[in-house]
Amino acid sequence: MENTGILIVGVGGQGTLLASRILGQVALKSGYDVKVSEVHGMAQRGGSVVTHVRFGDKVSSPLVGEGKADYILSFEKLEALRWIKYLKKQGTIISNNQEISPVTVTLGFQKYPDNIEAKLKKSVNTFMIDAKEIAQNCGNPKAVNTVLLGALSKMLCFEKDIWVKTIKDIVPPHTVELNLKAFEEGIKAIN
């Protein structure tokens, strides 16, 4: 199998690192060589967070280069736009439609960009979902990560049973049922 590169991007505290851990384990349990690299940035202050996940028969580097990502899984739509240069021309973005203003916007130095969804859809194959509302309807808005993983799972070749087992193994025991429900709803969110 040719290597697959995925960027998981968002803002600190959104659960991007947990999502990358689950994705990496799913790929590993599916028999692939897997490399994961986390870049925290200003994560503790709500800054940008990106994780590179690569899997295939043999992966030599965890980093996904510019123009090489097959998928961008974005927890916030400005982050999708910020990282779009890493996506292949025929790549796909799956993004939460949530807006979280960066510090520069909060302090009034910049304006949050308009029409991000239109800009993304004009450039690349884009699926925009309201993952936060879906997670909230499942019982906890923090389950955005498993909603987005459910959506991504429709694009990847991994068996559903492996996703379910991995989620059960990794999320806190008292959140398993909620996260599995969020994962299922994420699958349904992609048409």
Image (spheres, rainbow, N blue to C red):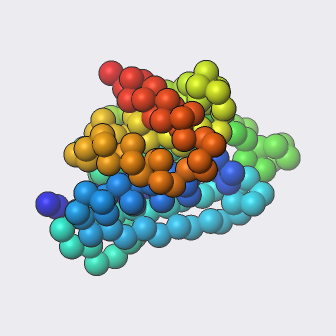
Tell which of 89 and 69 is nearer to you: 69
Direction from residue 16 to residue 160 in the image, left or right: left
Is 105 above or below relative to 55? above
The extreme front residue here reads 173
The quarter of the rendered structure image containing the C terminus is top left
Direction from residue 174 to residue 94 in the image, left or right: left
Tell me which residue sits at (40%, 34%) in the image.
151
Tell which of 30 and 42 is nearer to you: 30
Is 162 above or below relative to 117? below
Tell me which residue sits at (54%, 41%) in the image.
176
Where is residue 121 drawn, in percent x and y? 40, 30
The answer to which quarter of the image holds residue 43 is bottom right
The extreme right residue here reads 107
Where is residue 143 drawn, in percent x and y? 59, 38
The quarter of the rendered structure image containing the N terminus is bottom left
Is 93 above or below relative to 83? above
The extreme left residue here reads 1
Tell me which residue sits at (46%, 47%) in the image.
167
**Res. 10 in view:** no
Where is residue 118 drawn, in percent x and y? 47, 27
